[in-house]
Each structure stands twice: as structure tokens, then as C-alpha cells.
Image: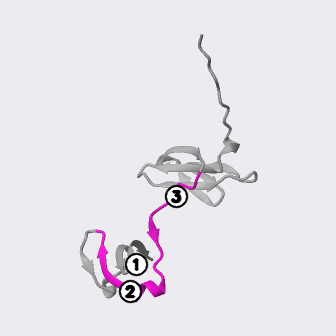
Amino acid sequence: MMVVGTHSMQAADYPYLTFELSDGSKASVSVTPDVALTFNGNTLTIGTKSFTLTNLSKMYFSAQDETVTGISTLQDTDSDEIVAIYDLQGHQVSKDQMHHGIYLIKTNKGTSKVCIK
């Protein structure tokens, strides 16, 4: 004798709609009762985020925000404790050499990835 069980899941069980782009990055949008999903030509818009359809790899409901980038904000107090700064190619740079981009900043508290805008 075999017993088969089922478990019903609904989109309402998940608070986020996550979009995975063709470059592997992800963006999650909080799903609320009033959020609207619209299409205009080749663009999908949900809430305040817009996506070009050709750049979307997949879309799915998720239990958590998957937009994590791992990029931190450097606090003013941390900038006094900088031990070393590296660009993404691994070259050590000085504060004066930093331009727009992503850097690895080593402080006395640890190492963080930061974005300079």
C-alpha cells in the first residue's frame, strides 16, 4: 500500500518576487496586495523596478530578498582605520587613486567590498 500526500503552496506564501537576469544578478521585489506587474513593449515593470525582457533569465517567488550584493557602505569612522585598498584586479591603490568603481577595503575591523559612486 502506498500513501501519497500533497502540500499546497500559493504565491501568497512568499513575500518576494525575484528576477534573475542573464548576467546572473538578482533583484527581488516585495509582493504586496497593491503591487502591479505591467508590460510595455519589451519592458516589464513591477513596483519601482523595470526589466528588459530579453535580459531576464527567470522569475520566481522567494521567501527572502535575494538582491544581496555583498557591497558595503564605508563609514566615516572606518576610513580612519584603512589598512589597505585594492581594486578588482588585485592592485593596491591609495585613497587618491580611487575613482568610480568597486574596491576591497581592508580595515582593522575586517575587509569589505565597497562601491564608490
Mark positioned earlier in the residue sequence (1 or 2): 2
Q: Is residue 44 left or right of residue 94?
A: right
What residue span does the magenta drawing correspond to? 64-88
Q: Specify the label residue 109 is tagged with.
A: 1
x and y, in percent, of residue 16 in the image? 62, 51
Disc 3 marks a residue whose amino acid type is Thr
Front residue of 108/90: it is: 108
Identify the residue at image location x=45%, y=79%: 74
Disc 1 marks a residue whose amino acid type is Lys
Front residue of 94/4: it is: 4
Q: Is residue 4 left or right of residue 107?
A: right
Identify the residue at image location x=31%, y=79%: 85
**Mark 1 or mark 3: which is in front?**
1
Spatial CA distance of label 1 from label 3 is: 25 Å
The residue indicated by pointer 2 is 81
**Mark 1 or mark 2: which is in front?**
1
- Residue 66 part of the magenta segment: yes
Mark positioned earlier in the residue sequence (2 or 3): 3
Could you tell me if the residues under marks 1 and 2 are in contact, i.e. CB atoms within 8 Å?
Answer: yes
Residue occupying the far top of the picture = 1
Front residue of 45/58: it is: 58
The residue indicated by pointer 3 is 67
